[in-house]
Amino acid sequence: MWVIFVPATLAAELIGVSTVYAYSFTLLIADLIFLLVLTRFVPNRPRLVLLAYWLSAPLVLATYGLGLNDLIPALLLFLSLLFVRQYQFYFSGIFMAGAISAKLSMIVALPFFLIYLYNNQSLRRYLPKFLASLAVGCFVLVAPFIFSAAGMQMLLSNPEMQNIYQLHIGLAGGVSIFVIPLVYLTVLYVVWRVRRLNFDLFQATTGMAFLLIVLSTPTTPGWFVWCIPFLVIYQALSGRVAIFLVGVFYGIYALSTLIITDIHLANGNSFELDAFLQIPGVLRDSAASLLHTSMVAVGIILAIRMWREAITSNDFFRLSRKPFVLGIAGDSGAGKDTFVDAITGLFGQHSVAKLSGDDYHLWDRKKPMWQVMTHLNPMANDLEGFCSDLISLTDGKGISSRHYDHASGKMSKPRRLKSNDFIIASGLHALYLPALRERYDLNVYLDIDEGLRRHFKLQRDVHQRGHDVEQVLASFERREPDSERFVRPQSKYADLRLSLQPIHPKMLEEADGQHAVRLKLVVNTSSGLSEVSLHRVLVGVCGQHLDISVSDDGSQVKMTIEGESSAEDIKMAAQILCPRILEFLDVRPQWEDGLLGMMQLITLSHINQQLTKRFT
């Protein structure tokens, strides 16, 4: 802590100025830096930040009236938060260590950092970086003080730490329940139960924990400074009612502090509000208790509003209660696996649980039953098991699932599959059962051109899976009746139908295997997609040729997309078209080039639309 005051103190000594001014000047500089840091968290409301933070009565009273230096550790904590937000985890760990070294009580924020980095699976790989820099920072800044004689004495006899245990509930036998640790651990458990935190949720839960600690313990006025920046952000994100309540909270706290605290002035004198107003001692205690009770009541109201507005209304929090389920059906060779991998690349393997219908074939490839039945027949698949496992994943439960190996034609040993934020169920019969369709948030059918499907399937089964050409051609004829009867009718249940087609049918006849077939993407949607904004983005950003037709009632939209787009163009289009969902994507989402990237973009826009419906 005191190292920060050294430069100004040395300068004051050199020019012969009192070190009191050097101390105050350092606090003023830290105050200005804190103001600038907060504008990074709330970039669009600088005036509110200025009024709600810099002119807040508790901050002025604690820092400039009482001369407390709790502003310093709070600033270091928020710098650590800022670097987390910018994915600079080495710096975040260093500043977190600095905050702990400046005020050991700041360690209460550390578990929230760890839960955020661990439970947000896209950031989990950065956790070692944060821990390494935190360890180095603590070794340099904290360890020398903690293990010194003065440090141990201060740690053991610190009156502020003793305040934490003053509020307790006495039980029979002399046992007590300490309220502050109970509240803190409860908040930690609730945060842990959220499967994946985003930054706003992480920030809000940390701020609420600080507020509850301040409300529940007779802390010094300096501890209240820790809550002010979190309350500033909350006011900026909420509205006038929040601004009013926080103002009342500040006023009551400042008044109660003035009554019970001696303010030492720069000339060495002290000032007491109750003495100035000639308040009798009995009334002083009653007034202080009444004000403190009122402050706690308003603070609890603020905590409840923060829980409702900043936490339970957070999209990540609501998604953690119920994952988003995507159902993808299509004929054999329609590109289901490729499409699933492309969607998974956007959200990251860590955020997706994939359920494949191939894993629910009833028999291995060499079983005699396949001589009289094809994979496309629902009776050859355990659709009830597929449905049951999907329900379990949707309810947040893990399942035990086998994997069908296309190379060997055999099932693997059962493996454990955990639920996740996004569940993708794909297969020949993914939309076949009503019970399955009811579980999906979005139904997708890959309705690939039949000639193109046979072309791709022939290439895949011969070159990738090692089947004979004659065997593959024979399977086309044998499977056609089942495809016509069981698979293709599922397209009528789809919210989104994606069809790859050759630009001209003769291109397949002329395909020589050396040159890629030029394709177009035909999109049919019944989800009420905003075709105007999509047209503007696809043409203006991606340079696509786009034809759109809309049904008379506006419920059905058909788009034909032609052209080549880079992954960068498609990424830019997604930022314009559906900015809200970008936060759910991986830190570095894998966008594809060409029409596969178009399929990613169209599907993502539909996911964004469905999540918006769920969250509003």
Image (cartoon, rainbow, N blue to C red):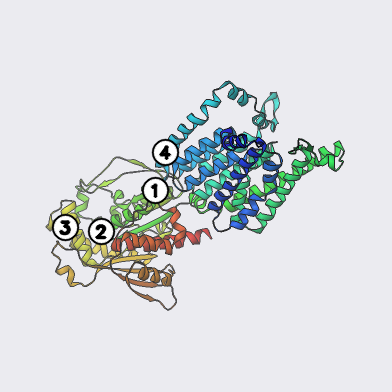
**Is residue 539 placed above or below 42 in the rendered structure?**
below
> At 43% from the left edge and 68% from the top edge, which residue is drawn?
529
**Quadrant location of the C terminus?**
bottom right
Of badges 2 and 4, nearer the viewer stands: 4
Residue 118 visible in image: no
3D distance between C-alphas at marks 2 and 4: 44 Å
Q: Which mark is residue 389?
A: 1
Of badges 4 and 1, nearer the viewer stands: 4
Of the residues shown, which amino acid type is indicated by label 4?
Lys
* Quarter holding residue 60: top right
3D distance between C-alphas at marks 4 and 1: 37 Å
Of the residues shown, which amino acid type is indicated by label 2?
Ser
User: In terms of depth relative to the viewer, which is nearer, 6 or 376?
Assistant: 6
3D distance between C-alphas at marks 3 and 2: 12 Å
Q: Residues within 10 Å of mark 1 (few under 14, many from 20)?
A: some
Residue 74 visible in image: yes
Instruction: Provide the residue designation for mark 2.
Output: 332
Mark toward the start of the polypeptide (2 vs 4): 4
Residue 268 horizontal/vertical position (percent): 76, 35
User: In terms of depth relative to the viewer, which is nearer, 547 or 433?
Assistant: 547
Number of callouts in the render?
Answer: 4
Residue 224 horizontal/vertical position (percent): 66, 42
Secondary structure at numbered mark 4: helix
Instruction: Provide the residue designation for mark 4.
Output: 129
Mark toward the start of the polypeptide (4 vs 1): 4
Mark toward the start of the polypeptide (3 vs 2): 2
Tag 4–tag 1 contact (CB < 8 Å): no
Residue 262 horizontal/vertical position (percent): 77, 37
3D distance between C-alphas at marks 3 and 1: 31 Å
Tag 3–tag 1 contact (CB < 8 Å): no
